């Protein structure tokens, strides 16, 4: 006899206020196998004879009279949508239907009335060419209200909570992330904790309320030298939980965020509860919360946090931006995020038609589909079905990232899952298992090289990365993710050791790979161009005597700066500090070229 068990399910409140439940029913192929009933006007009972039985309490403000039931045969998921209550519900049965092409997006558990908070969220988009929408396939997401061009401002938002990375505590403003030395300002320390630092009185006052929630804790850590080595996560979670406790509007906005708690394993839930105990210990006396609420806030924060990064991809801090969290991910994004004085800004980097989704990238884009999907599942709890991950044409364009070189022709390659070259059909002697093992060994060596570099052992890192490139030159595709990572890391290692010419060479090879993967206006491409331009300029600067080829190299560096400047003006806006820095570099090179002509 088969065991009847509880199926996995997720519940949510949509942007229109509808209550929704998704029930996963592995092994069920027809909607008519599923029975859905109202029990005592207060709960739903979902069952499949001999397989599943689930009872879910319905919120008081929800009506079951006009409920819609859809079954996705492809995903084996039952979706039930109930509107807000208009009158008392009557007991009865639902009619099941089959929706073969239904696409389900994981939603978060949220059963409280969020209408006021929803309006606050909608208001965040009011003055921008973007709007919130809700659909079965994409959940809550952001679309263009009008046709957009690259460079158009899409959205801007101040953080609910923002904390600086521990390694930048002494060098960047804790509110706006301004570099003290670059801005030429004398930092001001918080008079309370003597730990937080700001670029001026304006940022000190702006941060006062949020910082007050962690100031006493930081003061204790500073005076007793007892704080954790990396306190960023704890600072973020204490501030988020305290804000939830004392600010009803902020709490409502946080409650709108997805948490994915319903999909957590027992081990993950135990870890969340342990973290919640630590957060509760440090909460201010005027911001007490029960343990379950803290767990929910922590889970929502983990899923929705944005790293505050510069153009080079360095994570300067972390922020919780409720509006920005509504932008869906794409591995081929049409928008990018930047930060100006601590505020998050979204701009289009590709043309977008009215009504089309506006998407940003949550992860590193130069990775295979398998790794991207794994990373997103681990960090954001969803299986990516963006165009790059699901379109057969784009999947084929991604093949070089994991492909091996053809041993016969120069134009073709052997895909990761194939054994023959797609171009000349030459058979590759190395079997799939051996290829997988070889790539795994290369990636392990890269991790070791990265650790050496971070520890300042640049010689060891250089030797390992050079060895990887030599061993894979005749085996892996030139754009394989292993070779791209090795070029990028080696360029950084050479820059650290002031081997500028070698750094520029590796950077150029990385750019060649990036142009095949990244959108042409993506800031990551601009950042690498700037790094190569800097390496060329530094190389010329350390040469003792000018040579005939110097002018051509200066022109090459200028061209790289100009290209990067065009990208960043579109991606970040003309007022961004990175754009100003590039303008200065361009001006200095033009002056040098003018003096030589």
Image (cartoon, helix red, strand yellow):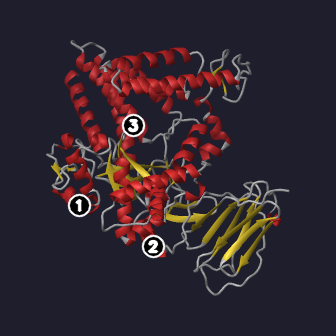
Of callouts 1 and 2, the N-terminal one: 2
126 sits to left or right of 477: left
| Callout in the foreground (1, 3) | 1
Q: How far is disc 3 from disc 2 in space, using C-alphas?
A: 38 Å
Quick one: quadrant of the N terminus?
Answer: bottom right
Mark 1 vs mark 2: give the one in front.
1
Q: Earlier in the sequence, mark 3 or mark 2?
A: 2
Residue 116, percent from left and from top:
45, 75
Looking at the image, which is closer to me, 414 or 18?
Answer: 18
Task: Give the residue at mark 2.
Answer: 119
Q: Are marks 1 and 3 in contact (CB under 8 Å)?
A: no
Residue 481 image point, x, y percent? 54, 29
Rendered position, 93 above or below 304: below
Q: CA distance from mark 1 to mark 3?
A: 35 Å
**In this rendering, position of residue 181 left or right of residue 369:** left
Residue plotted at (67% across, 28% down):
415
Q: Which residue position holds label 3?
A: 526
Residue 23 seen anywhere in this rendered image of the structure: yes
Work out which residue is located at the far left of the displayed protein and give it. Answer: 186
Q: Quadrant of residue 192?
A: bottom left
Mark 1 = which residue? 208
Residue depicted at 82% across the width and 66% down the height: 32
Q: Which quarter of the image is occupied by the C terminus? A: top left
The part of the image, by quadrant, that contains residue 225 is top left
Mark before the other along the chain sequence, 1 or 3: 1
**Among the 4 quarters of the image, the one containing residue 579:** top left
Does residue 396 lie above or below 99 as drawn? above
């Amino acid at each position: 006899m088969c065991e009847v068990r509880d199926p996995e399910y997720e519940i949510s409140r949509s942007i229109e206020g509808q209550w929704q439940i998704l029930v996963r029913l592995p092994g069920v192929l027809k909607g008519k196998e599923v029975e859905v009933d109202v029990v005592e006007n207060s709960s739903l009972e979902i069952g499949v004879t001999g397989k599943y039985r689930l009872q879910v309490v319905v919120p008081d403000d929800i009506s079951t009279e006009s409920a819609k039931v859809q079954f996705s045969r492809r995903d084996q998921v039952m979706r039930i949508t109930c509107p807000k209550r208009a009158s008392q519900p009557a007991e009865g049965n639902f009619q099941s239907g089959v929706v073969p092409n239904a696409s389900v997006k994981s939603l978060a558990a949220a059963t409280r009335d969020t209408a006021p908070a929803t309006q606050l969220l909608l208001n965040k988009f009011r003055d921008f060419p973007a709007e919130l929408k809700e659909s079965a396939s994409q959940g809550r997401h952001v679309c263009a209200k009008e046709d957009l061009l690259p460079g158009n401002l899409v959205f801007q938002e101040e953080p609910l909570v923002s904390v600086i990375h521990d390694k930048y505590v002494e060098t960047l403003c804790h509110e706006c992330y301004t570099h003290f030395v670059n801005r030429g300002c004398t930092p001001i320390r918080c008079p309370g904790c003597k730990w937080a630092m700001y670029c001026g009185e304006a940022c000190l006052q702006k941060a006062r309320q949020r910082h007050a929630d962690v100031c006493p804790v930081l003061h204790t850590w500073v005076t007793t030298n007892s704080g954790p080595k990396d306190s960023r996560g704890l600072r973020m979670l204490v501030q988020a939980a305290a804000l939830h406790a004392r600010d009803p509007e902020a709490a409502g906005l946080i409650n709108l965020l997805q948490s994915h708690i319903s999909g957590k394993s027992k081990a993950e839930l135990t870890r969340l509860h342990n973290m919640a105990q630590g957060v509760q210990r440090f909460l201010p006396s005027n911001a007490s919360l029960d343990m379950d609420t803290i767990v929910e806030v922590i889970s929502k924060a983990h899923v929705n946090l944005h790293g505050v990064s510069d153009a080079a991809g360095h994570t300067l801090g972390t922020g919780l931006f409720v509006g920005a969290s509504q932008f869906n991910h794409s591995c081929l994004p049409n928008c990018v995020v930047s930060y100006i004085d601590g505020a998050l800004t979204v701009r289009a980097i590709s043309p977008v038609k009215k009504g089309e989704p506006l998407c940003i990238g949550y992860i590193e884009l130069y990775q295979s589909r398998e790794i991207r999907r794994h990373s997103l599942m681990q960090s954001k709890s969803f299986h990516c079905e963006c165009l790059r991950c699901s379109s057969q044409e784009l999947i084929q364009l991604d093949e070089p990232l994991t492909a091996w070189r053809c041993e016969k022709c120069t134009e073709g390659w052997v895909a990761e899952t194939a054994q023959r070259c797609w171009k000349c059909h030459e058979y590759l002697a190395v079997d799939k298992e051996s290829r997988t093992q070889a790539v795994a060994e290369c990636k392990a060596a890269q991790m070791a090289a990265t650790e050496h570099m971070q520890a300042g052992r640049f010689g060891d890192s250089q030797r390992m990365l050079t060895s990887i490139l030599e061993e894979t030159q005749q085996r892996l595709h030139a754009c394989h993710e292993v070779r791209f990572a090795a070029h990028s890391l080696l360029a950084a290692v050479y820059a650290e050791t002031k081997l500028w010419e070698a750094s520029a060479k590796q950077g150029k090879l990385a750019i060649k790979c990036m142009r095949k993967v990244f959108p042409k206006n993506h800031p990551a491409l601009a950042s690498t161009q700037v790094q190569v331009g800097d390496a060329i300029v530094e190389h010329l600067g350390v040469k003792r005597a000018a040579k005939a080829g110097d002018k051509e190299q200066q022109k090459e560096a200028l061209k790289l700066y100009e290209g990067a400047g065009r990208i960043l003006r579109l991606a970040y806006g003309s007022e961004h500090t990175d754009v100003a820095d590039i303008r200065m570099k361009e001006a200095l090179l033009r002056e040098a070229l003018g003096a030589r002509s």
